[in-house]
Amino acid sequence: MSIAAEPTRLDPAWLSPQSLPTALALPATLYTDASILALEQLAVFARSWQLVAHAAQVAVAGDHIVTEVAGVPLLVVRGDDGVLRAMHNVCRHRAGPLATCNGRGARALRCKYHGWTYALDGQLRSAPEMGDACDFDVSAIRLPQAHVAQWQGQVFVALDAAPPLADVLDGIDARLGAHTLADYVFHHRSSYEVHCNWKVYIDNYLEGYHVPHIHPALNRMLDYRSYTTETTAWYSLQHSPLENSGGIYANGEALYYFVWPNTMLNILPGRLQTNRVVALGTDHCRVDFDFFYPADSVDAQQHMRDQNFSDEVQHEDIGICELVQRGLASGSYVAGRLNPKRESGVHHFHELYRRALREQAQHAASAG
């Protein structure tokens, strides 16, 4: 992550709440200035729930995954007691990693640097050759923990003060009804690196306004006239009836959930895709797509059609997002008006973003 020597001075007008009928998009500076990403790590990513795994990856004691949130390396591990924990993957000796890749059935967590060994609950168990250290108490040392929660088979973590995950996702279970995602089985991950700011990708996801112009095949499947966006406190939902899918999807409805600040749930008949947008730099992000299908779904050809179509749509999105980033960086762009009917999801995201930056500014001011 590249950070500018002199951080951008945020214009208070950029962060003021805006009503949808008169709302402007975010200014270009928030997508192009390197110092903004450092601010977002504190204001956005460190104070929100991040989707990091599916529960099958951490099903039994010792199963673990490595991840990172807001620059903090994390290790999500199932303990001997069955409890799932998210611990800092940073040894308390000299900051070495406890794990460098996902794994199964570990009996302990051993630092790769000097061999300090921790129990699966994060308590230091042994420290080689530390017998001569004065007042060194193994029992007083343990790994710091982040918050962890599960929902519908998905594992989320949060570093700092975030609303309870149940509050963030309130209402989704009721909308899904008997459509239980927890029973779905992970199939594979597709990752895309995109040369645009993470918010450009989110903005694009949050509106169907571009679908007739960028996604001709998808546009034929969705009923654009019935394409609707709903917003709640922490997430938005775009939904449309499915038609003319050419056998890729069954009849039903496409549900596209966006969960603040960077998680998407694409729920279509007989399949689930989860997406997490990871900021890698000011103009560089990665989108991790995880594909899930019902446990009894064995139609390999159908899965391949689904995945190929998803890949086609993603490349269409990547192309336009990278062009938008160029436009934002050109110096030509002045924040434009949002379409109240088609871009209410974008407005919702921008309002949450503005609020997060306002709260961070207030926190910094109160801290001195």
Image (cartoon, rainbow, N blue to C red):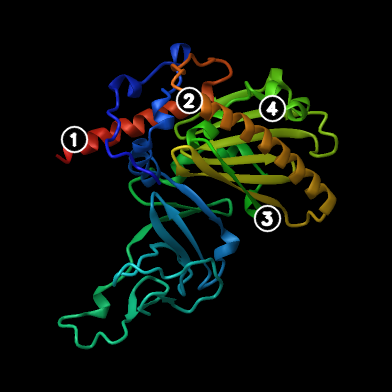
> At label 2, which amino acid type do we have?
Leu
Q: Quadrant of residue 136?
A: bottom left
| Mark drawn on residue 43 | none
Type of amino acid under label 1: Ala
Amino acid type at image mark 4: Ser
Q: CA distance from mark 4 to mark 1?
A: 44 Å
Residue 240 is tagged as 4
Q: Which label's residue is closer to the chain start, 2 or 4?
A: 4
Question: Mark 2 sits on what residue?
Answer: 328
**Disc 3 crowd, CA 10 A, few/some/many (<14, 14-19, 20+):** few
Give the residue at x 65% y 34%.
255
For marks 3 and 2, give the CA distance. 34 Å
Q: Is residue 59 left or right of residue 84?
A: right
| 3D distance between C-alphas at marks 1 and 2 | 30 Å
Residue denoted by label 3: 188
Residue 51 x %, y %:
51, 49
Please tell me how crowded label 1 is: few (under 14), some (14-19), or many (20+) other residues with Cα within 10 Å: few
